[in-house]
Amino acid sequence: MIPIAEPSLGEEELRNVVEAVKTNWISSKGKFIPEFEKSFANYCDVKYGIATSNGTTALHLALAALGIRSGNEVLVPSLTFISTANVVGFCGATPIFVDSHPDYWCTDPSKLEENITEKTKAIMPVHLYGHPCDMDPIFEIAKEHNLFVIEDAAEAHGAEYKGKKIGGFGDVSCFSFYGNKIITTGEGGMCVTDNEELAEKMKVLRDHGEDPKKRYWHKWVGFNYRMTNLQAAVGVAQVKRLEEFIQKKRKIVEWYNDALRPLSEKGLIRLHPEMPWAKSTYWMYSILVENDFPISRDELIKKLEENGIETRPFFPPIQAQQPYISHTEKTPIAVELSLKGINLPSSVNLTKQDIEFITKKIKE
Ligand SMILES: *Cc1c(COP(=O)(O)O)cnc(C)c1O
């Protein structure tokens, strides 16, 4: 079976984990945690990194630190992983679903304003499948309406918008290091920010809201969202390999695009886009199966599975799912993309032969 995504773990990851175990520093204190926070924040060209137990807790921590609460509304894309919306609910606030841009699948900035009310407090752009959002117009709108911007960068470590790394755009930006993300710590996440005060508040909230100067005195209702030294031990080694991973991913995309271009020229599929202002990291290389394709998207998924190729359909629009069914925002592009999209195997371990095999099967 060719898996959709698998991690690439090397000697240094192993050495670091062994060191953490041998020295007994396996919980949420230990040298790898600040080292990982520093090196990853540095990679993003941002001052502060606050490591968390996973990407979802990073997002919740960011919203909590920004004071998002009951009565607030937060704009999130309809086409994203469910946790972007769930964390808004964790704060007692309401997610409002915004449609996607048809050309690059992320939040369409021209659909934001119609969803803004006096309750709106923040925008959460999601850099879907590794492609950055169009940040300039998003910021223009955020500024005009006095809204926070929290990047959900869980799928886009190292992606660039107009030559600048994502992660440095929001008030806070949040990453995931889940096993299938571009770099991994098993489970893990991080908030990055240039705002010192926010960074301090996130550190306190991550650790039960305890006053750093007074043991067992708690300023806020905090959380335990800490990362362990074991996770950070892996992270420290993974950050060093991130650029190499991105280069390999972009190579894989070239192989896919070269092989699949004839199908896209016939209008049977659409290839994973990259806008002129974007450098995508193609977390998941994806295609859209158009209506003229001889079999349906779901049949293609099944056929590929029969041939030992794991794929995934795009996320369903969040309002289509049980907890959000009462939401009535109309997002026709997200609906269309979710019905047509497939993620193809995207691990950095893939060879040219693997891609030739996968694309040959798609053509068959
Ligand atoms: C993976 C992901 C998350 C959540 O990260 P976890 O580490 O799995 O909690 C959030 N948002 C998006 C867009 C993701 O892809």
Image: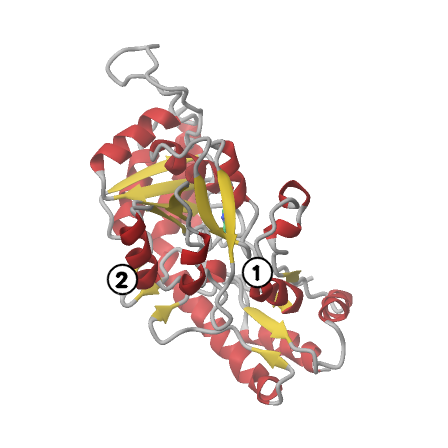
Residues at marks 2 and 1 touching, judged by CB atoms closer than 8 Å: no
Which amino acid type corresponds to the residue marked 2 in the rendered image?
Lys
- The Cα–Cα distance between marks 2 and 1, rounded to whole angstroms, is 29 Å
Quickly name the residue at label 2.
164
Is residue 253 or residue 68 the one in the foreground?
68
Q: Earlier in the sequence, mark 2 or mark 1?
A: 2
Q: For residue 189, which numbered disc appears in the image? A: none
Give the farthest residue toward the front. 118
Q: Residues within 10 Å of mark 2 (few under 14, many from 20)?
A: some
Q: Nearer the viewer, residue 21 or 139?
A: 139
Residue at coordinates 36% horizontally, 41% vertically from top-left?
191
Quadrant location, the C terminus: bottom right
Judge left or right: residue 292 versus residue 356: right
Q: Residue at x 63, y 59 (%)?
A: 3
Badge 1: residue crowd in 10 Å (few <14, some 14–19, many ≥20): some
Q: At which x and y percent is residue 115?
A: 46, 53
Residue situated in front as seen by the camera: 326 or 63: 326
Q: Is residue 154 above or below residue 58?
A: below
Give the camera-side residue of 106 and 146: 146
Numbered tag placed on residue 331 in the rendering:
1
For image coordinates 40% across by 20% down, the residue present is 208
Quadrant assignment for the N terminus: bottom right
Mark closer to the observer (2, 1): 1
Location of residue 132 (image quadrant): bottom left
